[in-house]
């Protein structure tokens, strides 16, 4: 056992005592990708599934071989069934998905669409979401049997769900509606009752908050949820806009990020929310849409850990890089490797995920471990 592992422990259920290693709560949308073209000028799209909270569960299942499930909702129509089909390929258990009747035109309930172009060079990535009145945004407290999700053992609880070791949700889901923030709180409280570790990704999206109170409302919601969190994820903008903590040393455009400034910010966050056992953040300096400096740091057990990172990392599709970082980091902690290994695993997984299209990871665990060792990109044949 390394010093970092010995100095830091999470109260994790043993793997044998739960059916799922992780359960996530969030909306899953159909991503429509124009490839090398622009949203406004393309004549064809490629379809993927994606959603911040779901991407974490999928990465853990597909790349790291863990048992994961998602709690979400869809309108029962061909678009919803297409998303379901894509999710089945990702290996995430769908037993907790709710299906709502479709009225034929989507007046009452519908499925979310996410148009995203990758960006290149000077042209930044661009997203355009169409997610009003979606099934997931209409989830309400009392509709999910969280005791069935989190309780029981692998043997005793199979009919009810079987229990979980880790629960993950985030600020995207909490921003969808007044009711989803309440559902997130309900789920987090239930997870804590059952001894399940709770992680939360701040994931601030200005487009989701701008019509319902902006950054001030985001901070109000996230400060209500933060006392229920064990492991918190976020980047520099998230902690400032979504939680109200400034990062010293970050310039106006968040181009220059000093580790010391992050440490001081993280210490202030832990002082405000002493329940937090871990804070983890990615560090990104976007020289262009295609070349980013990329790394990560975390604060755990009173210590700051830093992943070596990459300079001028070549980016194919940056969307989902943070979610893949979170899944790699969670894998490291679930497997008992300690914060330093977990951080390097998360940074490598996030870096590799940004070399392929779509929101979700397409890489293998062996590729992640190779990247952690700074293996070369020579052809493997």
Image: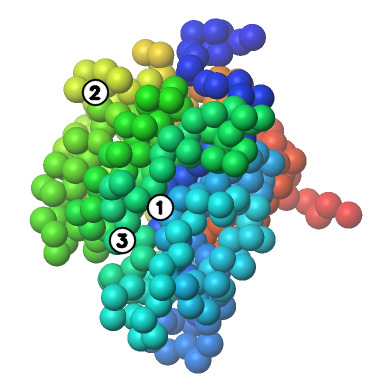
Instruction: Residue under label 2, please give it.
Output: 273
Q: Is residue 33 visible?
A: no
> Residue 350: x percent and y percent?
54, 46
Crowd around label 1: few <14 · some 14–19 · many ≥20 (10 Å)? many
Q: Indicate whether 119 appears above or below 56.
A: below
In this view, which residue lies farthest toward the right? 381
Q: Which badge, 2 or 1, is on the more N-terminal residue?
A: 1
> Residue 346: x percent and y percent?
54, 37
- Residue 129 picture quarter: bottom left
Crowd around label 3: few <14 · some 14–19 · many ≥20 (10 Å)? many
Circle 2/circle 1 CB separation < 8 Å:
no
Q: Residue at x 34, y 68 (%)?
A: 134
Foreground: 365 or 51? 51
Q: Residue at x 35, y 50 (%)?
A: 143
* Image mark for residue 311: none
Relative to residue 185, is residue 291 drawn left or right? right
Q: Secondary structure at mark 1?
A: loop
> Residue 345: x percent and y percent?
59, 34
Q: Secondary structure at mark 3?
A: helix
Q: Which badge, 1 or 3, is on the more N-terminal residue?
A: 1
> Residue 157: x percent and y percent?
58, 34
* Image mark for residue 26: 1
Of tags 3 and 2, the one toward the viewer is 3
Q: Residue at x 23, y 58 (%)?
A: 177
Q: What quarter of the picture does the C terminus occupy?
A: bottom right
* C-alpha separation, residue under disc 1 versus residue under disc 3: 9 Å
Relative to residue 327, is residue 75 drawn left or right? left
Instruction: Residue under label 3, please give it.
Output: 137
Crowd around label 2: few <14 · some 14–19 · many ≥20 (10 Å)? some
């Amino acid at each position: 056992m390394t010093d970092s592992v010995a100095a830091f422990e999470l109260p994790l259920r043993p793997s044998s005592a739960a059916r799922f290693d992780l359960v996530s709560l969030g909306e899953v949308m159909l991503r429509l990708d124009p490839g090398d073209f622009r949203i406004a000028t393309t004549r064809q799209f490629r379809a993927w599934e994606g959603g911040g909270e779901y991407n974490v569960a999928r990465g853990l299942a597909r790349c790291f071989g863990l048992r994961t499930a998602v709690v979400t909702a869809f309108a029962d129509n061909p678009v919803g069934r297409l998303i379901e089909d894509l999710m089945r390929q990702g290996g995430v258990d769908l037993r907790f998905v709710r299906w709502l009747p479709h009225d034929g035109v989507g007046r009452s309930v519908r499925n979310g669409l996410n148009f995203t172009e990758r960006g290149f060079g000077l042209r930044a990535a661009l997203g355009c979401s169409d997610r009003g009145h979606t099934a997931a945004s209409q989830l309400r407290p009392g509709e999910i049997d969280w005791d069935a999700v989190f309780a029981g053992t692998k043997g005793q609880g199979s009919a009810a769900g079987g229990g979980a070791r880790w629960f993950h949700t985030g600020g995207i889901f909490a921003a969808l509606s007044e009711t989803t923030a309440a559902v997130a709180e309900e789920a987090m409280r239930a997870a804590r009752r059952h001894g399940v570790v709770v992680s939360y990704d701040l994931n601030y999206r200005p487009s989701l908050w701008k019509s319902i109170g902006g950054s001030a409302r985001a901070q109000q919601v996230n400060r209500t949820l933060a006392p229920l969190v064990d492991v918190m994820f976020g980047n520099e903008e998230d902690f400032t806009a979504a939680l109200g903590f400034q990062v010293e040393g970050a310039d106006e455009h968040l181009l220059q990020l000093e580790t010391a400034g992050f440490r001081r910010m993280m210490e202030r966050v832990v002082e405000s929310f002493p329940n937090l056992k871990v804070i983890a953040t990615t560090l990104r300096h976007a020289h262009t849409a295609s070349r980013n400096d990329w790394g990560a740091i975390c604060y755990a057990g009173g210590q700051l850990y830093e992943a070596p990172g990459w300079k001028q990392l070549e980016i194919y599709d940056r969307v989902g890089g943070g979610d893949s970082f979170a899944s790699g980091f969670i894998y490291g902690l679930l497997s008992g490797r300690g914060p330093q290994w977990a951080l390097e695993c998360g940074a490598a997984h996030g870096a590799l995920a940004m070399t392929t299209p779509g929101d979700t990871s397409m890489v293998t665990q062996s590729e992640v471990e190779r990247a952690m060792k700074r293996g070369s990109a020579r052809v493997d044949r």
